[in-house]
Amino acid sequence: MMQAKSKLLGALWYFQIVNYIDRIAISFAAPAIMVGMALSYEEFGLVLSSFSIGYMMGHLPGGMFADRWGVRPVLIITPILWALFTGLTGLVATLGAFVFVRLLFGLSEGLSNSSVFKAIGDNFTSVERSRALAFSTSALAIAPMIAGPIVGFLLGILDWRWLFGFLAIPALIACAINYFLIPAQRTVRPVANSENGASLRQIAMNRHLWIIGGMFVFFNIAYWGYLGWMPSYLSSAHGIEIKELGLLGSVPYFFALVGLLVSGWLGSAILYHYRAHMQIACYLGAALSLYLAYSAPSLAISVAGLSGAAFFLYGSFTSLGAIVLELAPEGGNGAFIGAINTMGQFGGALAPWIIGRLVSSTGNFAWGFTFMAAALVLAAALLATLIPSLRARMAVAA
């Protein structure tokens, strides 16, 4: 059993690595792309937002597919779609085509997201989930940490278009790994028709869905704003060249990895009963770090602020996943997760474009960072309302 769980986690980890390298590469390549295609900050923000719109559209059907047919077919098929649309990114010639391809790429990644959480929810106990999520989602920090230097090196010797052709190859490898290592689901039930499962109507009537979904909207404003614009901020505000940008931009993601591992350990150990409190602290810590980053008088302090923001943003992942799985209805956790992710991506869809527009109109990132910090404070306030429900659910489980 332990060996099967280890294989599953290994497959999910590589899957997430490729997912996020494909996703984050465009942020590190942003200065070269904007120059090459003569795009403004607002136009490039539209490109970033188009991915999030597609990503939002994919979550609910992806969760329903996972509940109906199991996670294995979803996790085998979707990397093939990533490979296709990643490669096509390097062939776009107009803003419209760029937006369309990134929207389809986001859709293909959104279809797979719920399956990752469902695979962990179906195969790990409540106590194990924070640690399992910390390991699998460590890829979310490692991917951009290694993507920066890789993208910087490749852009030093190649045109940015070739970069996306190379990135299609790891996605095909992920498909093969999942085929061999993801176990088949023994019992699969259609969510809407199962006597024991939760129907879509029951899921929609669940008040926890709307609270967590609203919290996720505000979190995603900060997360996707940070993910999409952090390298461009360093390049614009501090005059960092493309070659150095990849290395310097990877520094905050080292601290993101530390945040993931620390929170995963705490959430499965001494803070198991206080995961919501830990996540609230992460949101508020990230908000303060973002303020430090854009108000800093020097590059070193700015990078320190960005690193703190990454530590807390990524540190909240393990608690968030565990909280969602704790409150998910039995028999419908895939659709429940998919619905929450769909709602949350409204924030992810709006944030890159709004921040790009704010930068274009003001000439700096100050208001963009303020926008992200304020959203995190609102996310913390919503999460605080869930603490009584979490205590009651965990008391029953005990």
Image (tube, grey):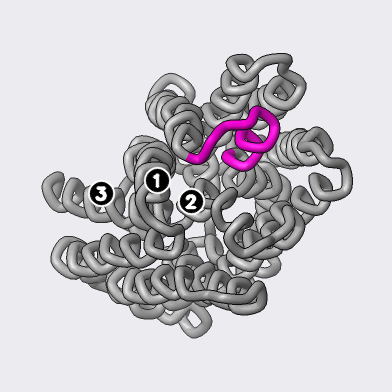
Q: Residue 24 carries which label?
A: 2
* Residue on which disc 1 sits: 156
Residue at 57% across / 45% down in the picture?
227
Q: Is the magenta stretch mostly helix, strand or loop?
A: helix
Mark closer to the chain start, 1 or 3? 3
**Cα distance in 3D space between marks 2 and 1:** 18 Å
Q: What amino acid does circle 2 point to?
A: Ile
Element under label 3?
Answer: helix
Q: How crowded is mark 1: few (under 14 residues within 10 Å), some or many (20 or more)?
A: few
Query: Does residue 249 appear in this view?
Result: yes
> Is 218 situated left or right of 112 in this image?
right
Q: How crowded is mark 3: few (under 14 residues within 10 Å), some or many (20 or more)?
A: many
Q: Position of residue 283 (x, y in %)?
A: 66, 31
The label nearer to you, 2 versus 1, is 1
The residues bearing labels 1 and 3 have C-alpha atoms spaced at a distance of 34 Å
Comparing 153 with 14, the one in front is 153
Amino acid at dot 3? Leu
When asked about the image quadrant of residue 86, the answer is bottom left
Three-letter code, disc 1: Gly
> Along the line of sight, which residue is nearer the eye, 278 or 15?
15
Residue on which disc 3 sits: 9
Location of residue 119 in the rendering, given as x and y in whole percent from the top left corner: 34, 59
On the rendered structure, is 47 left or right of 87?
right
Q: Point out residue 80 in the picture as x, y percentages from the top left corner.
A: 32, 75
Within 10 angstroms of label 2, few (less than 14), some, or many (20 or more) residues?
many
Q: What stretch is highlighted in magenta?
A: 231-242
The circle on residue 142 is: none
- Pick whichever of labels 2 and 1 is earlier in the sequence: 2
